[in-house]
Image (cartoon, rainbow, N blue to C red):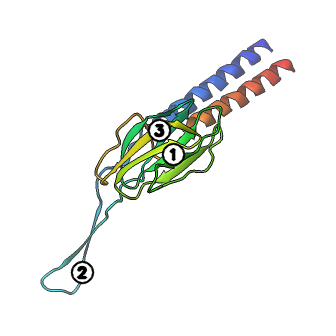
């Protein structure tokens, strides 16, 4: 009976480590960077004509996160390309509201309660100064440049894709541990 109770957890640990290795190896796979070309000859034409189609990929949509804390924006100033969505994330205990400074008022956010976000996509170049209208000492600046510019500042660039492998792995471990504990009690 004791051998059986020792072998089962060992088998479970082997399965867990195998799944972890598999998930890590999936995260390290990089997509091909080559632009595919499709070439098709057109029949019955002299001289031979070749039809070529080039597939052009649009640049990825970028999103950056600006943290709202107790009396500050982090980063306070950021440079982003046109088309970037800026997400203000409230990590403070109080509600905040971000708005572009007058006269333009390019954006005027909703009330952001703790733990929530507000986002705005910048479609025009320019310098956009903003403030928290609840706490005017909290100010920031977003510099929007042409599409070829890169993001500067300490903001977190978010690709919009979440990796749930880690969360799934932790849930799996919890379920297995609960199963082991229930088996030991029997």
Q: Position of residue 107 (x, y in %)?
A: 50, 54
CA separation, marks 3 and 1? Answer: 15 Å
Which residue is label 2 attached to? 42
From the viewer's perspective, is the residue at label 3 or at label 1 nearer?
A: 3
- Extreme-top residue of the structure: 2
Q: Earlier in the sequence, mark 2 or mark 3?
A: 2
From the viewer's perspective, is the residue at label 2 or at label 1 nearer?
A: 1
Q: Is residue 94 left or right of residue 121?
A: right
Q: Is residue 113 left or right of residue 136?
A: right
Residue 139 is labelled as: 3
Label 1, secondary structure: give it.
Answer: strand
Q: Is residue 111 above or below residue 23?
A: below
Residue at 34%, 39% (x, y): give it. Answer: 152
Can residue 20 be seen from the camera position used here? yes
Do labels 2 and 1 touch, CB within 8 Å? no
Q: Position of residue 49 (x, y in %)?
A: 18, 79
Q: Earlier in the sequence, mark 3 or mark 1?
A: 1
Residue 87 is labelled as: 1
Do labels 3 and 1 touch, CB within 8 Å? no
Label 3, secondary structure: give it.
Answer: strand
């Amino acid at each position: 009976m004791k051998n059986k109770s020792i072998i089962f957890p060992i088998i479970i640990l082997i399965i867990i480590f195998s799944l972890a290795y598999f998930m890590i190896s999936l995260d390290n796979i990089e997509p091909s960077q080559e632009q595919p070309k499709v070439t098709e000859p057109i029949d019955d034409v002299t001289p031979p004509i070749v039809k070529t189609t080039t597939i052009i990929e649009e640049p990825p949509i970028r999103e950056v996160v600006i943290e709202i804390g107790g009396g500050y924006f982090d980063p306070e100033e950021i440079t982003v390309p046109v088309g970037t969505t800026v997400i203000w994330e409230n990590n403070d205990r109080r509600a905040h509201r971000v708005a572009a400074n007058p006269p333009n008022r390019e954006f005027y956010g909703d009330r952001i309660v703790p733990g929530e976000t507000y986002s705005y996509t910048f479609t025009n170049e320019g310098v956009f100064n903003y403030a928290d209208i609840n706490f005017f000492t909290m100010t920031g600046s977003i510099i929007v440049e042409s599409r070829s510019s890169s993001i500067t500042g300490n903001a977190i660039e978010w690709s919009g894709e979440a990796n749930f492998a880690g969360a799934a792995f932790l849930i799996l471990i919890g379920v297995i541990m609960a199963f082991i504990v229930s088996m030991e009690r029997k």
